[in-house]
Image (spheres, rainbow, N blue to C red):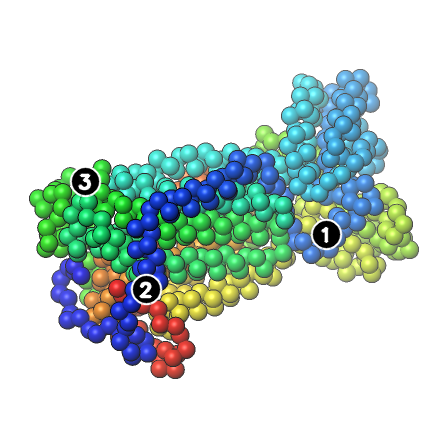
């Protein structure tokens, strides 16, 4: 094994039970050797997989849904289902078309009356519209008569109505004249505009991120051939996940956002896994002084790489899957399908990493460095030769990033308290604002002002009051209508109550709050009237659905983080065998996440940098951010943790020297962490520069968290823990060693 600096005498390689390790190759080593000698078979299998899933992939965007941001078991969703069945679908998903005449009352303008009639005909002709309700005074016609709302009842589910809004948006906009505006609004139109605008922004960000990604990959891998390997894994993960998501829509609706997040993780993990495997493969080649074309030696190097780095990658992917599985406890179709999309991409990238990538590496051998790209002065005379001589590798490895990481490890060994203390102070300062973090469901400001849903919202507020866009749909038992009306009229948070329709079991009452739909006051009003209404009443409407989802997210966020910590600790304990190291690796994840949300509070809640980033602050951070981003970040952080700690465990098992193991882990894996994090930060920052607010929040939070996690946690805090803990850090009680499986990373 090539090292920089002093290497202790090798210690006997023993298992955690104290028994000498078996010489039989590990399962992943055998898999790597088999893949390396059966390239055609591996390629044939993957071509079949890609053909099977790729056939469905082109339909992914049209098949995925645009809604699902609700708590499936909530009272508001129950109300929506009753309204859908008994009241012609005039619930939260109904379409609303706002017609506003700038020249006075609509009734006195023939052109305005004609437009209202044409709007009614357009809605009636749509198969997803069950009924059309014309404007009438006191409910959908303003007092001055200049603003009217034409409503189209939902004939399909929420996703069908979002697609209906997609289809109707352009025909309705063409009805407008210089004096009469026509805007499609309501919850379905909001999600239609939100998805379209954000999809466009994310595509633009992805296009911008690819050149940056390629530059960082070439610098990180040092060769054009090696830099292409992560892209191979990314495309496999994306195509497989896209096809699988289309198939999943036959079981349950899948959010269109599942594809966006699947792409992000396919790219991130494709880079992480390829970088880690290629770096270790190169080191294995160098130790064997493999000559070009020496296939058996390349296969042996692949087997060694799979026994060490491959095992770390397998555990890493498992931790990512476990982290994302915690999101499944949120009873929301959108959340569950987004987690599903990411998990599918993880499984696909992992499968390709453990089979196709070893087969390709064995075929390439030393040609993995073809198209070598070096910075000026970064190579020695020995490094320029086609086949490195034995002994030259150690001198070459002193250059570049490996030398930097080695010196960094030595510095941490000399000044652990200073480095650790300074980093903890920085993280604490950044995390402190998170104590005042407020969350809320997205307001209308997440949609740009030029979009139809927002323009219609503004017209409704001007004509009917601030609470009109969030009108509550109250289903009162038919025998308690009078009591329900009295309770609503007596509530200080309700501006007006209008009877809408009466069915066999329920009567539908429209209650308009005094405040806007995304305000805490309206949320309090919803909670209050639910206690005041007669037993059996249901409160629905878009504002109630948002409030119920926010409550579900708030209630489950502590549970999700508890599971992230608990399950993450167990997985690290199984992988590394040390309670102290597993605890440090798990708990430190929370530090970078807390710091990222502290920064998010300052920017998105308090409005700092709003002018620079060009957005209008909502006064809170989106409620789904802490839970969903927390799970995502936990998975990414565990990725880096296992890369670093598995390398440290490997060297500790070989030498028994904890400090040496820490420095070697930084030398061999530090560059992987830095390069992988660099790509991810660059990609996430392109989202932060996007127009809409949602990608900005996502980009800033993820970029800050990954940057802090890689720079502060993995390259400083964890090495300091290993340095201060010494041999104690790797100690495992005898009773625990008997319980845990014997997982080793040394070859």
- Residue at image position (55%, 60%) is 557
User: In terms of sequence position, does the residue under pointer 1 or pointer 2 come before the other?
Assistant: 2
- Residue at image position (17%, 53%) is 286
Using a 10 Å C-alpha cutoff, classify the residue at mark 3 as few (fewer than 14 neighbours), some (14 to 19) or many (20 or more). Answer: few
Q: Nearer the viewer, residue 585 or 531?
A: 585
Q: Nearer the viewer, mark 1 or mark 2?
A: 2
Q: Residue 76 got which mark?
A: 1
Instruction: Report how far apart the C-alphas of labels 1 and 2 lie in the structure.
Output: 54 Å
Q: Nearer the viewer, mark 1 or mark 3?
A: 3
**Is 584 displayed left or right of 299 in the figure?**
right
Using a 10 Å C-alpha cutoff, classify the residue at mark 2 as few (fewer than 14 neighbours), some (14 to 19) or many (20 or more). Answer: many
Report which quarter residue 67 is drawn in.
top right
- Look at the numbered disc 3 and give the secondary structure of its residue: loop
**Residue 492's spot in the image, x, y percent?**
76, 52
From the image, tell me which residue sits under label 2: 26
Asked if 705 appears above or below 646 in the picture, the reply is above
User: In terms of sequence position, does the residue under pointer 1 or pointer 3 come before the other?
Assistant: 1
Residue situated furthest bottom in the rendering: 735
Asked if 642 appears above or below 469 in the picture, the reply is below
Q: Are marks 2 and 3 in contact (CB under 8 Å)?
A: no
From the image, tell me which residue sits under label 3: 375
- Residue at image position (22%, 42%) is 367
């Amino acid at each position: 094994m090539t090292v920089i600096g002093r290497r202790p005498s090798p210690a006997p390689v023993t298992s955690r039970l104290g028994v000498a390790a078996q010489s039989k190759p590990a399962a992943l080593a055998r898999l790597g050797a088999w893949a390396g000698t059966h390239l055609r078979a591996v390629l044939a299998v993957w071509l079949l997989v890609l053909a099977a899933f790729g056939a469905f992939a082109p339909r992914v965007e049209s098949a995925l849904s645009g809604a699902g941001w609700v708590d499936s078991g909530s009272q508001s969703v129950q109300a929506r289902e009753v309204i859908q069945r008994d009241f012609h679908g005039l619930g939260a998903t109904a379409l609303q078309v706002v017609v506003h005449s700038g020249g006075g009352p609509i009734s006195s303008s023939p052109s305005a009356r004609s437009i209202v009639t044409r709007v009614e005909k357009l809605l009636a002709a749509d198969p997803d519209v069950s009924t059309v309700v014309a404007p009438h005074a006191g409910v959908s016609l303003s007092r001055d008569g200049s603003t009217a709302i034409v409503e189209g009842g939902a004939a399909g589910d929420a996703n069908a109505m979002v697609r209906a809004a997609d289809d109707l948006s352009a025909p309705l906009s063409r009805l407008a004249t210089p004096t009469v505006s026509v805007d499609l609004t309501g919850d379905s139109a909001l999600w239609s505009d939100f998805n379209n605008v954000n999809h466009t922004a994310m595509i633009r960000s992805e296009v911008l991120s690819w050149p940056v990604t390629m530059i960082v990959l070439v610098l990180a891998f040092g060769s054009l051939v090696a830099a292409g390997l992560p892209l191979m894994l990314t495309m496999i993960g994306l195509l497989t996940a896209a096809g699988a998501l289309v198939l999943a829509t036959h079981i349950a609706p899948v959010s269109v956002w599942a594809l966006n997040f699947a792409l992000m993780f396919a790219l991130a993990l494709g880079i992480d896994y390829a970088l880690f495997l290629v770096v270790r493969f190169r080191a294995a080649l160098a130790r064997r002084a493999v000559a070009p074309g020496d296939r058996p030696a390349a296969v042996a190097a692949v087997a060694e790489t799979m026994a060490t780095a491959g095992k770390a990658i397998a555990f890493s992917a498992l931790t990512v899957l476990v982290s994302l599985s915690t999101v499944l406890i949120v009873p929301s179709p959108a959340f569950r399908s987004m987690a599903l999309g990411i998990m599918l991409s993880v499984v696909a990238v992992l499968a390709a990493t453990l089979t196709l990538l070893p087969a390709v590496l064995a075929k390439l051998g030393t040609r993995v460095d073809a198209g070598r790209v070096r910075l000026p002065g970064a190579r020695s005379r020995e490094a320029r030769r086609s086949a490195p001589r034995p002994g030259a590798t150690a001198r070459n490895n002193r250059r570049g990033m490996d030398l930097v990481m080695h010196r960094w490890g030595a510095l941490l060994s000399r000044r652990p308290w200073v480095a650790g203390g300074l980093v903890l102070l920085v993280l604490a300062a950044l995390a402190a604002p998170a104590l005042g973090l407020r969350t809320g469901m997205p307001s209308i400001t997440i949609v740009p002002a030029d979009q139809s849903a927002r323009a219609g919202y503004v017209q409704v507020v001007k004509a009917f009051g601030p609470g009109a866009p969030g009108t509550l749909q109250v289903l009162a038992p038919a025998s308690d209508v009078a009591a329900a009306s009295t309770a609503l009229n007596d509530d200080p948070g309700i501006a007006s109550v209008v009877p809408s329709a009466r069915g066999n079991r329920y009567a539908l009452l429209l209650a308009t709050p005094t405040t806007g739909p995304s305000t805490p006051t309206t949320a309090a009003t919803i909670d209050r009237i639910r206690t005041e209404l007669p037993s059996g009443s249901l409160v629905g409407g878009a504002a109630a659905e948002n409030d119920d989802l926010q409550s579900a997210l708030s209630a489950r966020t502590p549970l999700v983080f508890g599971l992230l910590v608990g399950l993450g600790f167990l997985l690290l304990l199984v992988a590394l065998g040390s309670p102290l190291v597993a605890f440090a690796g798990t708990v430190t994840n929370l530090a970078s996440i807390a710091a990222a949300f502290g920064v998010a509070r300052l920017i998105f809640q308090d409005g700092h940098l709003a002018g620079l980033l060009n957005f209008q602050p909502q006064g809170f951070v989106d409620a789904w951010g802490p839970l969903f981003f927390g799970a995502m970040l936990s998975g990414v952080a565990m990725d880096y943790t296992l890369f670093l700690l598995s390398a440290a465990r490997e060297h500790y098992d070989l030498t028994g020297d904890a400090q040496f193991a820490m420095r070697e882990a930084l030398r061999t894996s530090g560059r992987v962490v830095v390069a992988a994090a660099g790509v991810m930060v660059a990609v996430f920052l392109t989202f932060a520069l996007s127009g809409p607010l949602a990608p900005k929040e996502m980009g800033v939070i993820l970029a800050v968290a990954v940057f802090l996690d890689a720079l502060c946690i993995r390259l400083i805090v964890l090495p300091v823990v290993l340095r201060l803990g010494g041999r104690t850090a790797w100690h495992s009680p005898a009773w625990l060693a008997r319980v845990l499986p014997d997982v080793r990373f040394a070859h």
